[in-house]
Amino acid sequence: MGLLSKIFGKKNVEERKGEPDMVYVANEDSRMNWAIEKANLTLWYFEESLENPKNSQVYFSVKVKIMDGDVGEHIWLTDPHFDDEGHLYGTVGNEPVDVNSVKLDQKIGIDRNLISDWMIVEGGRLVGGYTIRAIRDGIPEQDRAEFDKSIGLYIDEGVDHFKANLETPEGAILSLEKAYNYKDIQAAMDCKDFYEEAKSLLSNMQMDFDKETINETAEVLKLSFLKNIEEHGFPDFSTIQNAFPKREKIDETHWIITEVCWFPDGGKSVQELNVYKSAKGWVVLGPVAKEE
């Protein structure tokens, strides 16, 4: 049985002896929308890996939205490849349930803008597969082990591959960590906005403040940032793998991003970071203050 059949079966159902059928439904909620957005923001990694696969990358698949009149269904394609213009081709990898315009094992070409997910099996670990993770997150916790067993893959928080730039909140965090790795203080400063960090700090303290107070606080934060690096050196993220399982929107310019860092020894840390969309792009304000 193929991997996609293991995940979804013929009609998204897995049979268990002596137990009711487990039906996995991909709800169109904020979790699934974020999964699709995340897949598209990291698609570049899938494409580069498909072009030059590592020895540890043993399986590639991509999910697309197939339309049949007014009915749409997200279908996985096996053996995917892109032509020189970036158009996607592949083989329908799971039995369609809602659409009749394609069938299992049919070879098709489709607009890349209809991609909703991608997955790589890399060293036994699921990389990408964001909609699979969203489905898993919606399963009762007591059933998740059975879901994992049915797929036969190691499913953790993931290893994400956002581009390290200021175009996304996650990219801003990666840009700051990259600056640390290169010991580039100016690049690190470019990923920060001490004025907005000061405003956020003063607001959380529920203090009355004016522009002068913000400027003074921003200067203190900046000097503290520089002094900490001078005394303790740059943090080293060069051997760490990152995942960003959650975004929390505060307002249009302010988000809280959850970052998971995987260490070479198998350990991990989880932190929540404030990010802000400034005139130059997304910047990192600092960790979310924890209540005592």
Image (cartoon, helix red, strand yellow):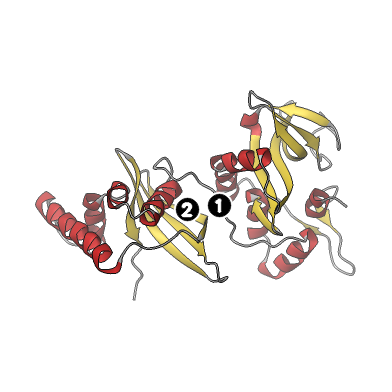
Q: Residue at x 77, y 34 (%)?
A: 90
First in sequence: mark 2 vs mark 1: 1
In the image, residue 91 sits, relative to residue 209, either above or below, namely: above
Residue at numbered disc 2: 247
76, 85: nearer the viewer: 85
Camera-side residue of 202 and 208: 202
Residue extending farthest to the top is 85
Which sits in the foreground, 119 or 47?
47
Q: Which residue is mark 1?
A: 160
Residue 199: give its label. Answer: none
Q: Secondary structure at mark 1?
A: loop
| Amino acid beneath label 1 | Asp
Image quarter for residue 23?
bottom right
Quarter of the picture holding the C terminus:
bottom left
Residue at the left extreme?
212
Q: Position of residue 243 (x, y in %)?
A: 53, 57
* Residue 172 image position (x, y, % from top left): 40, 48
The percent coordinates of residue 166 (x first, y second) are 39, 42
> What residue lies at 70% left-to-right and 40% top-to-bottom?
63
Residue 279's place in the image compared with 178, above or below, is: above
Q: Quadrant of residue 272?
A: bottom left
Residue at 18% over, 55% down: 218
**Label 2, label 1: how many angstroms apart (C-alpha)?**
14 Å
Instruction: Classify 10 Å Cα crowding around label 1: few (below 14), some (14-19), many (20 and above).
Output: many
Helix, strand or loop status at disc 2: strand
